Amino acid sequence: MASYALQVPSEYGYVLTVAASSLFVNTFHFFLTARARAASGLKYPIPYASQEQAAKDPKAYAFNCAQRAHSNYTENLTPFLGALLISGLYYPTASFYLGASWVVGRVWYALGYTSFGPPGRLGGFLLSITSALALKVMAVMTGLKMVQNV
């Protein structure tokens, strides 16, 4: 089995910068969810308002939207970071731009979901899912290129 030293391109710092910036989206979600929780009156450890509560109380419904947006972000963060960091080894500039558009899409998703409910998330979803898919394809292509170079 051959081995080689992994060299990162000089532009890889841009990839790391967008990866680090994506972590601040979590902080943004924290503030959105905390504000909605306080307004709803739901206390810890209740993770979501019940369907009955949400149907009767718009503030409980808004909390559920904020909480779900935050959960969706955490579900998507790990695959995004993996694809970004791998694809950036061969495609650092494209990975940076796609990663930045994912971050923008996730902020748009959070604002849309917390402001307008489920229909408000569509624009941010489309931007982030398209960016993530492209990064995943590029990550596979990076792996194949590395195998071919061994």
Image (spheres, grey):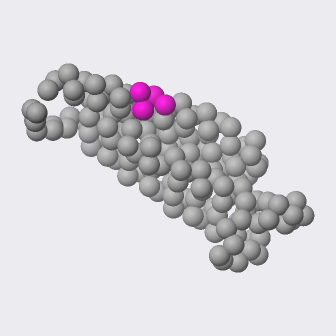
Q: Relative to residue 112, is residue 56 drawn left or right?
A: right
User: Please, which residue is most extreme toward the right here?
Assistant: 56
Q: Relative to residue 100, is residue 93 drawn left or right?
A: left
Residue at position x 44%, y 42% in the image: 80
Query: Is residue 93 visible in this depiction of the protein?
Result: no
Residue at position x 61%, y 44% in the image: 108
Q: Quadrant of the C terminus?
A: top left
Q: Compared to 78, does 55 lie above or below?
A: below
Which residues lie in the magenta part?
133-137
Q: Compared to 62, does 129 lie above or below?
A: above
Residue at position x 59%, y 50% in the image: 72
Location of residue 49 by image quarter: bottom right
Prevalent SS, magenta region: helix
- Give the x, y percent position of residue 21: 42, 51
Query: Is residue 56 visible in this depiction of the protein?
Result: yes
Q: Compared to 24, does 97 lie above or below?
A: above
- Give the x, y percent position of residue 122: 68, 37
